[in-house]
Image (tube, rainbow, N blue to C red):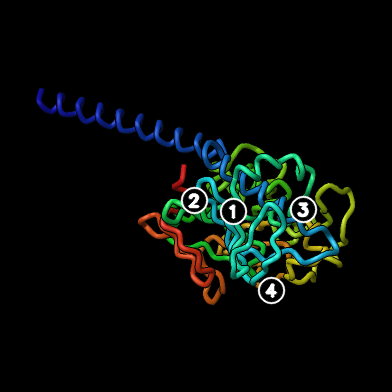
Amino acid sequence: MIASIALCVGLGLFLIGAALFRRRRNSSSAQARSGVSGSSRKALETVALGLRAVAAGRPRGERPLPDIHVVVHSGQKLTLRLAEADDDAPAPWTADVSGKEWSVDAARLRRGANAGDGLVHPYSLTVTLGLHRGERMLVDLSRLSGPIALTGDDNDVLLLAQALISEVVSGPVGTHATVVLVGSAATPSVTDGLAARSARLHTATTRGEALAVGENMVPGQRGGPSALQTLHMGRDRGTADSRTCARRLFVVTAAQYRNERWGDTPLRGTDALLVLGYIPALEWNLQVKPDGSLLTGRLGVPVDTHAARLD
């Protein structure tokens, strides 16, 4: 009798636990698939307007575009921290006395939004790494001159990768960027947690197939540079080609990186390569910590709450 009661109680607890697990899993999955929303989308719309204003203020053939080290969104203010001093900030941006920071009030960007609606900005791989003291910290992955390793606990790495990919393919900043998931990075373990289907998200089986995706893409045009022209393009962010060439983010696992020798692949200067897992001696390393912070290594951008924990 007692054994039967204990069995029934145990079975009931098991079923309740299973139901809660399914509910939590479905809720998490739905949240992941919903893409960028709420306060995050509003902040990213401000960032997109600000980056378009930078491009509009530096017409092609005039002064080079600034090399932006980090974009900081803090409530009603947007700040660009530049890699090199440039005191000639185009309106509505204002440069500080050092010329290494440009800032603008978000309301001014919204008032002038219509002026740059049709403009292609060259910072489409700018993504949110996370928050630092309540400020949103974003970097342009395409300005990093080599593969970017995303390391840490496997599940934490997966969640952050999904957050970064989802922001590119469903957010307002990455309008002219493409993400290519390659090989084992295109399996359901990665794709099931991404935002809703997007024409900007592609999958490929091999390195060769991945590199063929969008090789001639130029935003707003049917044609574009040939593969030969773009293959050996340098990483000068101020060139005319870097303005018009569509951005591509390739995502591979560490195993695929090694097996297909992605380290020897001559990518465009406007491409970025994200490696899920540890690869020795890579220059750029983003390490997810158990407390939710992100160590950015040589990049030097402080993040106390990484992007996957924001929403």
Q: Which residue in the protein does label 1 denote?
A: 127
Residue drawn at x 62%, y 70% is 83
Which mark sits nearer the N-terminus, 4 or 2?
4
SS at circle 4: helix
**Is any atom of residue 295 visible in this view?**
yes
Residue found 86% across the figure and 67% down from its top = 229
Quarter of the rendering containing residue 13: top left
Circle nearer the N terminus (4, 3): 3
From the image, state whether disc 1 or disc 3 is nearer to you: 3
Between marks 4 and 2 in the image, the one whose residue lies nearer the viewer? 2
Precedes in sequence: disc 2 or disc 3 = 3
Residue corresponding to mark 4? 264
The amino acid sitting under disc 3 is: Ala
Q: Quadrant of residue 291?
A: bottom left
The label nearer to you, 2 versus 3, is: 3
On the picture, is 74 further left or further right than 201?
A: left
Judging from the image, what secondary structure is the residue with disc 1 in? Answer: strand
The answer to which of 121 and 87 lies nearer the viewer is 87
Residue pointed to by mark 2: 307
Locate residue 54, reporting x and y percent: 71, 55
| Labels 4 and 2 touching (C-beta < 8 A) | no
Extreme right residue here? 223
Label 4 environment density (alpha carbons within 10 Å; few <14, some 14–19, many ≥20): few
Pick whichever of labels 1 and 4 is earlier in the sequence.
1
Q: Residue furthest bottom?
A: 281
CB under 8 Å between callouts 1 and 4? no
Q: Which residue is mark 3?
A: 56
Label 1 amino acid? Val
